[in-house]
Each structure stands twice: as C-alpha cells, then as structure tokens.
Amino acid sequence: MKSLFITPTKIDYPPKDGASIAAFYRAYYLKKKFDATCDLIAPGDTDSKIRLEKTGVFRKLFLYNKKPLWYSNTKALLSIYTFSMIRNSLNHEDIDNIGNIFDFDEYDCINFEHSYSYYVYNQLSKYFKSTHAKKVFWAHNVDYVYFYNLFKESKQTVEKFINFLNYIKLRFLEPRYLKKFDYILTLAYHDRVNLKKILNQDNIYWIPVNVPEPEQKDKLGSVLDELRAKTHNCKYRIIFTGKLNHISNIEAVLWFSNRVLPIIRENLKDVCFLIVGYAPDKSIRSLENNKDIFLYSNVDSVSPFFYLADLCVIPLFNDAGIKIKLIEAIKHKTKIVARPEALVGANLTNIIPNATNEKEFANLCLKALKNEINFDDILERANEMFDDHKNLSLYLNLCQS
C-alpha cells in the first residue's frame, strides 16, 4: 500500500498544531500498524526535513518554501484564490522537481489536505490526472463555515474583513474542489453529515484524527514530581491544553477562569488550574497573577500534564472540526468535562459530560473531582471509538477498492 500526502500546511517533528498533528500521525500509524509506504509534499525548510527524515515515517520527502507574505497578500486581494492557497503554492522549479522525484503512477492513493490545497492540486494535476490512484480529500473542517465563524468571532475590523473575504471565496471554491475526489474523508463527525448535505454525495466517510501515543507514565516519575512541586502540591488539578493565541482557545480559557473556576473554588478547596500550550496571548499570560493558575507554554510533551490532571476541561464555544485536545485526553484516560460544541466533531455529546451554563459546568467539574461520575465506562466507550487500527482500516479498504 503506497500513499502520497500533499498538504498545504507545514509539517514538522514534533508537530505542534492540529493540522500537522493529524497529517503526521496518520502516516505514522499507517506505517506502524500496516507497514504502508507514505510519501510527503509540504511546505518546510531544511531543518524540518532533517527532523522528519529521522522519524523514518516518510520514504520520500519534498519540502518547499512558502511564498512571501507581501506577494501572497497582494495576489489574494486580486485573485479568486485565498491567501493560504497562494502562500503555500509551488513555483515552476518545485513543480518540475516533483515530477522528477515522484512517480505518481506507483501510488494506490493520492491525498490532499484542506481546501487550501486547491492551488497546488491544479499545479500538480498534470502528473496524476491519468493515474489509477484513488484521489482522496481529507477535510479538517468545512473551511468556509470555519471562516464564517471566525468572521463572527473577530473583534478587529481588518481581521473581520479578511475572514469574511476568505468565507466568500471558499463558499464558491470549496464545493467545486471537493467534487474532484473519489473519496472525501472528514476528521470530524459532523463535517461528514454537513458535507453530504452540501455536496449531495455518498462518497464521504468519517475517519477520526490520529494523535500521538501517550508516553509511558512509569517513565515520567521525576517529571511528574517536579510538576507537583511547581503547582504547590495542590490536591485537585484541572488542565486545559491548546494553541494559546487562537481566539477560540482564548475565549475558552477566559470563560473558565473568570466564570467557572470561582464557583469551583467556593465549593472545593485546594484546586488549581493548569493552562498548557504554546504562544500564549497576553490575556492568558495575565491569568498567572492568580496564585492558583499556572501557565506552561511551549512544552515538549502534554503527556505529563494529562497524567497529573484530575480533570481536563474543554469549554470551547466553536464547534469547527474535531478537537485534538479531546482525543489526547481520552487516550490518556483523563476525566473530561466539556461544552457540547467541543464534542460534536467527535460524536461524543451523549457520552462525555457537558454543559453550556457556567453553574452547570462547574457542578459537573465538582462531581468529576469528587469521583461522583463513572468515568471508567465513559472513557472505555470513547477509546473504542478512536481505535487507530480500526479507523485507518477503512482508509486502506477505500484506497484498494
């Protein structure tokens, strides 16, 4: 089984953002569990290529330079293509080199990620339009819906305009692009439902996102001891993980810190809140002024924090895509309380405890911390849904059908 993955977002190791985590670990598990051959075309640099080569996940790698910001912004204003499509497009030399390095006829499946890959698809189509390989599109979101939500959430006028412009362009381009593929695979459950309505097609399947394997807890003893000491050995630790400059995560952290955590404090002593991620916004950094809130940015691994936590909260207001932090918590068998918006992409609204009202959310957190909810059954059911071998078997069957 041979697959070529073409992604318009930078892939590095270890991957940090959701898009690169999804792309890298899909290939990782295909190789590990099925001995599949995976090749990659993506933006990147020499250092990221060296790191990726050391993992041994990809047989062939072609990483190329993104277009300059000024060029991408200028052309996007005058083009039907979005900024991200232009920024991550190929130059003529890249296209020729790809034709020399890759034999497109050898693949069982040629995969494109995101609607942002539309420009690159058109640039490379001459190589694969007559191949027998299945063409597969991996949908991380319904992108035009995602940008419409960003438009509604944006506070600044310029940011609002850009997000609305992306929404208008993608509303036109995205459905037309997706109709070019043999199969559309969504990482989020509700995107499958929505795309079937939008496209009126039956070739759409849900294959959940793949996340890193949890580190072995017994090898993290000293790390866990150090974290316990840094958090003043508080009795109950609640965590949130994510990209801490993203508006959805900022909103979630501030809502929990300002509206929910005070209610928990009133009813339970010795509780602390650990915010874990990278590139924290200044509004999140300011929360460190609270003696029971701790910020950990740019950490090498989230595993120690999931093992240390008594509860993981996912109070997101945006239902776009599937939440990697949710799947990571499930894999680590950490208790979870969420807003329902965070669960729809994983089809877990009827399994994971959730609430939208701050008092109800706080009450669920208190019950979880006091062991008044049977999380053993909840997490067992959730883990069954995210079995990497079972879910990727569907991908292999589709590629080889």
Image (cartoon, rainbow, N blue to C red):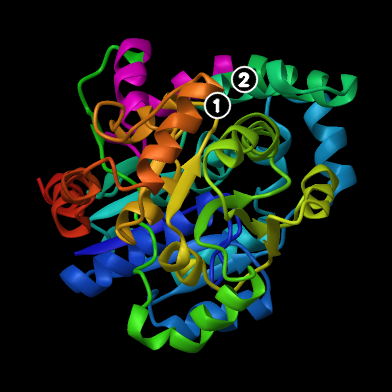
Depicted 401 relative to depicted 201: above or below: below
Name the image quarter holding residue 306.
Answer: bottom left
Residue at (78, 48) in percent of width and height: 287
* Residue 43 belongs to the span the image colors magenta: no
Residue 74 appears in the rendering: yes
Q: Is residue 78 at least partly visible in the picture?
A: no
The amino acid marked with disc number 2 is: Asn
Residue 149: assigned label:
2
Q: Toward the viewer: 141 or 315? A: 315
Chief secondary structure of the magenta portion: helix
Residue receiving disc 1: 318
| Side of 52 relative to 184 (left or right) | right
> In front here: 364 or 196?
364
Dot 1 crowding, Cα within 10 Å, few <14, some 14–19, many 20+: some
Crowd tier of the residue under label 2, counting other residues whose Cα lies within 10 Å: few below 14, some 14–19, many 20 or above: some
Quarter of the rendering occupied by the C terminus: top left
- Which region shows up in magenta? 171-198
Name which residue lies at 49% across and 40% down.
314
> For numbered disc 1, what is the local secondary structure?
loop
| Residue 265: % across, % down | 60, 41
